[in-house]
Every structure is written in structure tokens, then in C-alpha cells.
Amino acid sequence: MDRLLGFLARRAVLSILLVLFAVFTVLQRSIFLSEQNVANVARQVSFNGIIALGETVVLISGGIDISVGAVLSMAAALTMKLQPFGVGVAVGAALLFGLAVGVINGLLVTKIGIPPFVATLGSMTVVQGLMLTYTQQQPIPGHVEWFTVFGAGSLGPVPMPTLILAAVAVFCYWWLNQTRSGRNIYAVGGNPEAARLAGIDLDLYWFLPYVFSGVCAALSGVLLASLLNTSTIHIGLDTPLAVLAASIMGGASLLGGRGSVGGTLLGVLALGMLSNGMDLLGVFTYYQIAIRAVILVAVVVIDSFYTNRIQTRARRQAHAA
Amino acid sequence: MKAIRRERGQEARPWLKEGSWGWLRGVARAARGNIAFILLITIGLLASLLSDVFLTPQNLVNILSAIAVIGIISLGQTMLIIAGNFDMSVASVLGFAGIVAVATQRFGLLPCILLALLAGVIVGAVNGLIVTRAKANPFLVTLGTQSFVYAIALMATQSKTLYSEIPAFNILGQGRIGRIPVAVILFLVLALMLQIVLRNTVYGRYLYAIGQNKEAARLAGIPVDRVLVSTFILCSVLAALGGIVMTSRLNSTVANAGFGFDFESIIAVVLGGTSLFGGSGSALLTVAGVLVLGVLNNTTILLGVPYEGQFVVKGAVFLAVVGLDSLVKRR
């Protein structure tokens, strides 16, 4: 009973949002469930979805990555600006950039010992500066027409970015649940002391999630650039907030050791449908910003109530033993 | 978890072990303790070698007047960081307070300033209550309130620029006593006051105690939650004051006037030598840190580094200082 309540309480925001949409869609079937709108939502959530999966892995390992938004915008800029050298080169450079930032984040956290928040805050600033310098604050238009197929195209009824999100999700699920290294990531996040005594290389499994998260953010940047066929300096500004809210809403915790692919996808979907619903109902941008802020704070507060309970219980047990 | 990170750290980072590498740690520790002065002298020397404008009195006054606003905000941030917390919402409190001050000017000079400060009190109280009651992550909570306050500022202004209409309002930001801007004097007086509060009052000692070990502070009978809430309020009020000064200097304000000041104020505190791990630091160190930031900004401009490149320089310096801090502390 306690576990069930905890489960629901931790996903209260998610549950409320999903119920709200169920009611909404029944009332306004013609708009929300139109084939075009469904495809639209599926496409819109894919970009943050890919990043949120990377963020979830980082959260599971007990870290946090707030440099993802900056990486996304730099990857988009690289994708557009390097197109004259060939699309392969451009995309490769963007993904390599994400990988490099991930490696640096991981090293800062494990080898230097900077707290994850602070380390990724610093790398976020550096990457933002690089992006602003590289683009000279100008939008960069694309030159290769067929490249837009990755972001704007569809395979049958399914948008391309959604297919790529699905592929990343399947990989993530396999990694986290079916492989030893995936289980080790849960272990180092949930209880590092126990993980170390079990002979797990803590630094390695604190390090790998940052690399994955960096690559995911860059991949999302490539796709977003492909959709817009341009890159602007404004993309990615609210990405860290959105993906953290989605991951935590879906069951990941700042405490580490918790989180799942399915939960995060639901969280991303809930936030995406919220944006879509507010757009369709004509809610003004300012109010949308305010509503998203309230949701973020609510999600963080509920998560911390839950994790406090776990910590108190653990302390009591340690005291008894 | 902290203990284990420390223990693992020993194995993974041989340069931290005592023994043959011990001297390196000693150097790191010495550098950490005086980071602001090392940076100030290094950057100052570089700047005066590379540019003949740097050491002119006019340029030095320019540096001073540029740091007043960020300095006032950093003082509030210093208190919170000493107590082991952050406030990211300062960025939008700055813009919001400026808007309140301009929008309520028809009630008179004093009421409009008081109302703007009151806006800071409210945001700070909300931040503090959420962080202490829910024991929630201060970073994410204040990031949330930052975006909420920004939304309100946007609604209030409809993204337009508001102009100040009372001439007396501008003394705070534009006035000078001799060559020194009033705002700089305000900043230095506040810094001195904060230094006295931190060193010589019970409240100040509470902040250090909470930052070093919250649980121990609680067991020692310190009203931890009440102290933290009041610190969040003070930090927001100082951010609001920063917003008033900035509005007064520019004679106008917009909703995103404080863009970037959240991170900037944290950088200033860290550059001064206050540890992000909490429990140490002082107002005077932050004054030094703010000076470093001002000189750094000024130098990059004098050397013709494009505006965008400043982010890279600042971020890299920040990471270097925090990295040094982490290596020395290993917490």
C-alpha cells in the first residue's frame, strides 16, 4: 500500500496531466485526435525526448547534466555551417562535438570531483560562448534540400524524428535493462558504497552517462537543424528545464538509482501534449512559460518529498542496526 | 556517498595522495586560498602590458561603475552560498524589481523603491519556503521561480521597454560623488555591512554553521529553516536593489534586463574564493571576486575579444577555479 501510494504520489503530476488529456481529447476529439495533430505532437516531442533519455541515464547514475541545451544549439550550428563540406562531415562533426562535451563533463565530475551541477553549469557557459562566437549571433540557413528529410520527413504516417527517438529508446532500454553496464549504472546511482564493495568501477559508470547524454543532445540538435533547415541562437534555452521536468515526472530522481525509459517517454509526452493543448487553445506564450515553471517546481517538490522519506527510512534502519 | 567519493578520489587521483605529490597539493591549496588576488594581479599585469588604456584613471572608474550592480547581487548570493545554497532567480528578480519601480513611480520616489524591494521579499520568501519545507534542490526550485517571475514580468510589460520619469530616481545609478559613482559607494557600504554581519553577529555565524554541516547545526539548536528563509529573502532583496540601481542607471528597464546575472553572480562569488561547497567565504572575498570579473570583462573588451568570446573565457575560468576547489576539498 505504502509502495503504491509512493508510486502514485511520485507521478502525481504525470497522472494529473494524463487524465486531463484524456478528458480533453474526449471533449475536443476532432482537434486533438486529428491525424495531423497526432503526427505533429509526435514530431514535436521527439527532439526533447531524445535528450530526456540521455538525461535520464545521467540522473540514474546519480548525476545531472544541464549543458544539454547549449550542446543542442552548438550541434545545430555545426550541422548547418559545415554543410558545404558535405552533410556527412557536418553531422559527424556535430555528433563528435556532443561526444567531446560529454567526455569533458564526465572527466570534470569523476577525475576532478566537481559536483555535477556546477561542472555542467560551467561547461554550459563555455559551450554557449563557443556557439555565439561560432555563429556570430546570426541564423545560419541550410543549403542541402534533401537533408531536411531527417527532421521534417515522414516514413508512412510516422515522422522521421519519432522513428529515431524510438531507436534511441530501444537502445536505451536494452542498455539499461539487459546489459551488465546498464545495471551497473543503476547500482552506482542507487548506492555507490554497495556498488564499490561489489567491485564496480564507480568512475567509469559515473562517466559513461555524460558521454551518452552529450551525444543524445547533439543528435537532437542535428535533427532540429534538419527540421528548421536553419540554426538560430535561441534554440535550446529552455531545454534543460524541460528534459529535467520530463525525466523526474517519469520517475527519475535527483537522488540517483531511479528512472526508466518508459517513464521518461511518458513525461516527455505529457509535456508535449500540454504545449500542444495550450497552443491549440490559444494560451498566450507568457502564460505558457508561467505554467511550465509551476509544473517544474511541483515535480521537483514532489520528488524531494519522496526522496526525503527514503533517506529518513534508511537513516532509521542504519540507526536500528 | 560523500565519504565514498572522497575515498574513491584517493585511488583515482594519485596527485591527491600525500607523499611524492604532496607538494602539488600544498601549491593547490595555497593558490585556492588567494585565488582572487592571484587572478587580479595576473589579469591586471597582462592587461596593462597589452593595452595602454587599462591603467588610465578613466578606465579604472569605468571598471568600478560596471561592477556595482553585479556586486550588489553577488553579496546576496555570497550569503546563500556560505549557507550551502544557490539562488538562480536573481536574474529575473532584477528585471521584475526594475519594472515594479518604474510602474509605481506615480506614487512617489520612496514608495516605488519600497514596492520594488517588497517584490524581492516575496520572491525570496517563496524560494526559501519551498526549499526548506520540501527540502527540495535549491538550484531547480529557483530556476523554476526564475522562469515564473520572468513570465510575470513579460505579462506586466507586454515585452515593452518602460521608461523612468522621476529625475531624482536616476541619482542612484547615475550620480557621482567626486569621480566615484554613487552605486559603487552603495555596493562598498553594503559589502562592509555584510562583512560585519557575517563576522560579528549570531546570524552570520549561523550561516557558516549551516553551510558546514546542516544536520549538526540543527542539533546544536540553530533554527536552520528560519535562517535559510531569511537568507533567501535577503538575497532576493539585494537582487531587487540591484535591479533598481540598474534601472536608475539606464533610465529604463525591460523584462529580461537581468539575463545572465544568475550565473554571473555565482562566478563572482567563486572567483573571490568562497567555496561552492558552503561553510566558508566572506563579503570582502566577494568584493575581490567582483573586481576580478570586472577587470576580466574590461580586459577582454580592451583586447578586442568579441562579446561572445567572454562567455568562453568566464566559463573556463569558473571551471578552473571550481576544479581547484574540488581538488583541494575532495568532498
Image (tube, coloured by chain):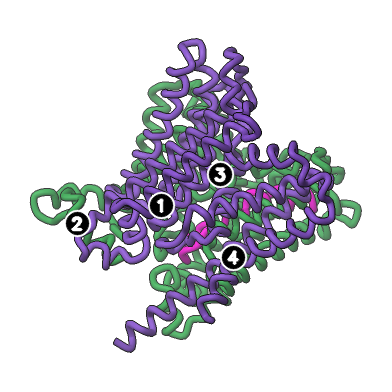
Chain colours: A purple, B green
Q: Position of residue A278 (x, y in %)?
A: 78, 48
The picture places residue B144, in percent across and down from the top left corner, at 63, 56
Look at the image and say whether residue B19 sits in the magenta stretch: no
| Sequence-earlier tag: 4 or 1 | 4
Q: Which mark is residue A11?
A: 4
Residue designated by label 2: B10
Give the camera-side residue of B163 and A103: A103
Separation of marks 1 and 3 at Cα, in angstroms: 22 Å
Q: Residues within 10 Å of mark 3 (few under 14, many from 20)?
A: many
* Residue A287 in the figure: left or right of residue B43: right
- Boundaries of the magenta span: B77-100
Q: Nearer the viewer, residue A207 or B163?
A: A207
> What residue would you read off at disc 1?
A116
Res A317 quadrant in image:
bottom left
- Looking at the rendered structure, whether the residues under marks 4 and 1 are on a common chain is answered as yes
Could you say which disc has been placed on residue A143 in the image?
none
Q: Helix or strand or loop: what does disc 3 sit on?
A: helix
Q: Report which quarter residue B248 is drawn in.
A: top right
Q: Residue at x 71, y 42 (%)?
A: A38
What's the amino acid at mark 3? Answer: Gly
Q: Secondary structure at mark 2?
A: helix
Q: Give the spatial CA distance, label 2 vs label 3.
A: 37 Å
Query: Which residue is denoted by mark 3 in the rendering?
Result: A49
